[in-house]
Image (cartoon, grey):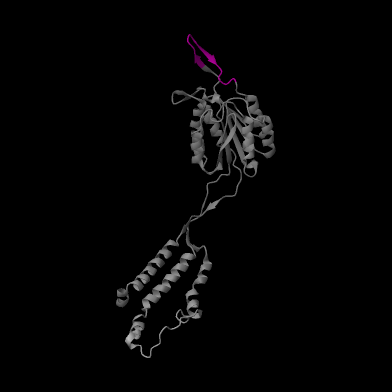
Amino acid sequence: MIQLAWPWAFLLLPLPYLIYRFAPPALAAEDAALWVPQLEHFGVAHHQQGSRRPRWALILALLCWVLLVVACSRPQWLGEPFEMPISGRDLIMAVDLSGSMQIEDFALHGRQVDRLTALKSVAEPFVEQRVGDRLGLILFGEQAYLQVPLSFDRATVKQLLSEAAIGLAGDRTAIGDAIGLALKRAEGDARRQVLILLTDGANTAGALPPLKAAELAARKGLKIYTIGIGAEQMEVSSFLFSRTVNPSSDLDEKSLKAIAETTGGRYFRARDRAELEKIYALLDQLEPVEREQDVFRPVTDLFPWPLAAALLGTLVLVLRELFPGLRRKT
């Protein structure tokens, strides 16, 4: 259907008639420079007779004015309404970029990769599937940085996550500051949001202790899901022999469990990429936060068409006045 954004513009339609009816003629205020008893020698009669505009020019001028008024009213074409696929989830991902994330204890496509690379290979498809959810991204190491505020722009979240590099935020881990930043940047009610925190170590930096941050999050209703990353066994080769070590010995599972339990979330352990995929599959089944359904109706402006027609008609009238030959033919 068609609607007018500014229908009051049609009040301008009688403006030319009002000017013609009540405004003084343009030549009435001018004093005559010369009066002569006879005008035949000056060809005035012939000029006045030839200067009368034809009826079609008057009709075209009126039509141009009507088209201009129609363009000023901003006609718009309204498309069919459809509901936006918004589930109501607000998810913030906090990703650890400390130096320990470079340990290559994950397998990806038959080769050993570091923890951050394995995390990206699972998190990016997860982000792509969150159609209708608002996503945010926090990167933390020695300090925490908000890379993407809550937004529907999944492409930006994926791009900045893929560009994240180990050590970008420092070599140590500030888990408490990451939680505090999520609380600080929470838009509106924190109860509408979920924080997914991924780390492979313990809190070794920052001003805010993790458990204190979890208590603050619990008061505001922010639910935190924590994920501990890293294998439990890894073969390390030396010059003479190889030995088995635990590359996740620094992982503070006790604190991560306490953070999740304090805020009503859950703790997950990802020892390899398969477990990490299962965890993200479970996170994808989170209960959505109730929110009013958004309805979108596409709007297309139509004013360029009457405006172009009015300008074209005005051009015809101007050309007629500028070129006397065209005026005589008409």
Identify which residue is drawn at 44% across, 71% down. 65
Q: Nearer the viewer, residue 238 or 218?
A: 238
Task: Report how many numbered discs are placed on residues in the image.
Answer: 0
Position of residue 118 relative to residue 159, above or below, is above
Residue 95 or residue 85, whichever sits in front:
95
Q: Looking at this rendering, what residue extends furthest in the top direction? A: 240
Q: Residue at x 62, y 36 (%)?
A: 181
Instruction: Kindly tell me whether residue 1 is visible in this rendering.
Output: no
Measuring 50% from the left and 40% from the top, which residue is drawn there?
Answer: 156
Q: Is residue 144 above or below residue 11?
A: above
Residue that extends furthest to the bottom in the rendered view of this protein: 37
Residue 102 seen in the figure:
yes
The image shows residue 89, relative to residue 177, as above or below, that is: below
Residue 248, horizontal then vertical, whole percent = 57, 21
Q: Quadrant of the C terminus?
A: bottom left
Q: Position of residue 105 (x, y in %)?
A: 51, 22
Q: Is 247 positioned to the left or the right of 255 in the image?
A: left
Q: Position of residue 77 (x, y in %)?
A: 47, 60
Please state which of residues 16 and 211 is positioned toward the viewer in this rendering.
Answer: 16
Task: Judge from the rendering whether residue 106 lies leftward or rightward of residue 212; answer left or right.
Answer: left
Displayed quadrant of residue 257: top right
Asked if the magenta segment contains residue 240, the reply would be yes
Give coordinates of residue 19: x percent, y percent.
49, 77
Please tell me whether residue 45 belongs to the stretch shown in magenta. no
Over which residues does the magenta segment extend? 235-249
